[in-house]
Image (cartoon, rainbow, N blue to C red):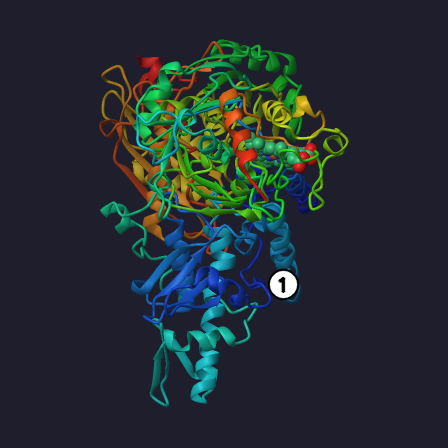
Amino acid sequence: MNDMAKPPRSRAAKWTRRGFIGAGALAGGALIVGVAVRPGNPVGKLGPIVAGGEGEQLVNSWVKIGADNVVTAIVPHCEMGQGAHSVLAQMLADELDADWSLVRVMQAPADGNYVVTDTARGFVAPGTLDAPDWLEPTWNGLFTKISQLGDVMITGGSSSIRTTGQRTMRIAGAAARQMLIAAAAREWGVAAAEIVTANSTLSHQASGKSAPYAQFAAAAAEEDMPQTPALKAPKDYRLMGTDAPRTDIPEKVTGAAQFGIDATVPGQKLTYAAVRKVPVPGTRIASMKADVAKTMPGVLQILNMGDFLAVVADSYWQAQQALNTVEAEYTRSESAIRSTADQFAAFAAALDQAGDQGGKELVGKGDVAGALSVSAKTFTAEYRAPYLAHAPLEPMNATVWVRDGKCEIWTSTQVPLMARSAAAKAIGLSADDVTMHQPTLGGGFGRRLESDYVVMAARIGLATGYPVKMIWSREEDTQKGLFRCADLSRFTGGIDAKGRLVAWNNVFTQHNDPAEACDAPFYDVPHKSIRVAEAELHLPFAAFRSVDHSQQAFFVECFIDEAAHAAGRDPVEFRLAMLGNSPRHKAVLEKVAAMSGWGTKPAAGRGRGVALVQSFGTIVAEVVEVDMSQGKPRLTQVWCAADPGFAMNPDGFRNQMEGGIVFGLTAALHGEITLKDGAVEQGNFNDYPMLRIDECPPIAVEIINADPVHLGGAGEPGLPPIAPALANAIFAASGKRIRELPIAKHFA
Amino acid sequence: MMHRFALVAIGALALAACGSKVEPPVEQIVLREPGQPAGAAPAAATDLVAAGKAAFAVCATCHAVEAGKASGIGPNLNGVVGRKAGALADFGYSAALKQSGLTWTETELDAFIANPSGKVPGTSMAAGAVSDAERRKAIVAYLASLTP
């Protein structure tokens, strides 16, 4: 997995914020030994901020214990349905020997003390993870500083468990446990080594003494903090690797959970803003006519902000109704791209110009031209992926109150510190004057890595001076946000006389993150050239769940399938033959083949398709069975085998595979954003449909824990294989090869 | 190798956060303050100074008006009517405003608020333009009502 982790060098100069979070470049290579808590225990400074409750005691930055013996894990990542809050607490609680029924989770404040140092470090400098113990505090300190400079408090890249979980929460739990033991040993006058811990209780057998953690919490905070505490070996895990029930579910079931859109401003009456951005990216409002809106009930203010219109009213409904009556004219766009056809023509032109060898080489190996010229058989394929909107259930929104040179913001975000800085900048304040409140996210999917909506709300708040909640309508959310890029990708494959794939030539136009998403280096292919010939995008880009893997896996794994058919071989057997040097990938593929009964003949009219992808450190193979007997694809079953190294919470991990598959099926079957006159055509779920329950097949997931030290992610890796597996199944069932997404439109 | 590039990238991020430029509303139509009974005539019609005080909310993020209070992002505006432009010692004005030679009469204030950088090219007041003449009149009346 390690070689996979290194993006091609040419990419390095292009590190961007997206690069930073999207890159699946968390290399392993480290045993969990040289990890550290930050030197010096800042409980004195942080206590008042995060442990102000009656009887609460902060033991170190990440854990507090209440008088009622409740252990609270302070978690620096956001909760957006992926379950990270609960599983991060589970990891801390295991090292602390805490009683899971008495563990709670608290969202860490958007504060420089809670930057995700280990996420930054895992992506940026995985080599330092092998640092010797004595150097560890130095690296840790350096990356904390860097993260503070860059506002690195980020949830993305399927990284929370494998970075912050492994290298922050576990260490914090283990350190707190050692500090509790030291405090008890001092008080009881016994050797620390004789004290045992279990279920949030300390006990000393010889003297018969025992006490709940709460009793020693305050004394523990005074103890020296071990910087490299001993961590449990997998055989000693009690909570890690179990289906410990998630802490966030009860609130979500009862409806008590507070999402961004539920925000209230204590003691204040809220006002509401509805907004309408310019329809074509990059244009401005030339004029506004608001005569009708001025007379409508509830309206407080009508704003022309240059790049968007806003109506502020007593209720959201009144604001939106009034906004609907506001007429505007817009400046002309400078983009030559007006339609979807224009966009794909721009892609095709870039690829035509690149030809067989042009563009920037990302992966180069052997002699592709030579290998193609002597291949027994060659074939070409061109694949298309459309623009996609994230369509989270909770539309973009933010509540702000700007007053007396200060600003408070309540919003769902994956990047609270970056959002804070962006908002501060937009209203002429310093970041320190802006306080962020971080409710639960009603879906992130990469959309909430961007802060555009937070900035809009802050600008409205500056204009009003009173508390206002800005909410985007569903149409606004679908049309005016940022998008998964569209792309076009061309391949030429060469098969030798023995039916092996020997040449792989590929060029496409969009290269974002992870940098290695365009490659599948686990397959042995001797001659390879993968290139990018960049072409301009009309719509602004945002990372989408699994980012480039979301389109590249479709291109690559359909290409591999076409190669298998060109070679006249079974798609699973063809892939297995290329996995001689990748035993874990081979095991995953064999597992899914066994689960799906791959060798058996499907029922009449049905076919099965397979795909194998590694993304964000996790290897996933999926098989789809599809029934084409009605002339349209109907999925009958999905099987998924995944090797994340070690699933910290297997139920949560399966849940993420299923979620990734369902999200991926929405995109594969239905997802398409198109352009007309430079603007997005779709608006709501009627023309941008989600997968319906009657379209969703049973999904079986099995987990292989092949390496408990080097973990992969969970949030994204389930998605990439599903589109190619489905397209490949349709080919198997019907002989129809789908090279353009979404699939449903080929059967309309 | 990798971390060197990333350091550069993170440095660039930190820099991008500086150099702020506030983009104020191009047009702001205030009909009512929250809490005022719906259907009440716009405040401007009843009491100019009260309407000005409400409309001053857009300025208040940057400007204090209480006598003796320290300047914030913008200079304290208590007693500004009749004052020479750029006169407060506790505020770092732009050279443009300092050397403008203006005295803040009600007419000059009106012109400045209508288009700050048009009236004083090079001013560092990036936000706060008010295009609506009624609201400008109210704000100026409010400023004139403030006594040290």
Residue A259 placement, left or right of A418: left
Q: Where is residue A371 in the image (x, y as percent from the top left)?
A: 63, 22
Residue A710 placement, left or right of A728: right
Residue A70 placement, left or right of B18: left
Q: Which residue is drawn at 66% across and 25% down?
A: B117
Instruction: Identify which amino acid the numbered label 1 is placed on.
Output: Pro
Residue A393 placement, left or right of A486: left
In the depicted structure, whether residue B5 falls above or below residue A103: above
The residue where tag 1 is placed is A137
For the image shown, how many numbered marks are present on the structure?
1
Q: What element carries label 1?
A: helix
Residue B18 visible (yes or no): yes
In the depicted structure, whether residue A533 falls above or below residue A715: above
Q: Where is residue A95 in the image (x, y as percent from the top left)?
A: 43, 66
Q: In which quarter of the image is the N terminus of chain A?
A: top right
In the depicted structure, whether residue B96 falls above or below residue A73: above
Corner quadrant of residue B89: top right
Q: Where is residue A29 in the image (x, y as percent from the top left)?
A: 58, 53
Q: Where is residue B67 in the image (x, y as percent from the top left)?
A: 58, 46
- Is A414 or B36 nearer to us in this picture? B36
Q: Quadrant of the C terminus of chain A?
A: top left
In the depicted structure, whether residue A627 falls above or below residue B35: above
Write down the chain letter for disc 1: A
- Is A45 or A270 nearer to us in this picture? A270
Corner quadrant of residue A105: bottom left
Residue A235 visible (yes or no): no
User: Crowding at label 1, few (<14), some or many (≥20) Cα neighbours within 10 Å?
Assistant: many
Q: Which residue is drawn at 56% across and 34% down?
A: B143
- Is A596 or A23 nearer to us in this picture? A23
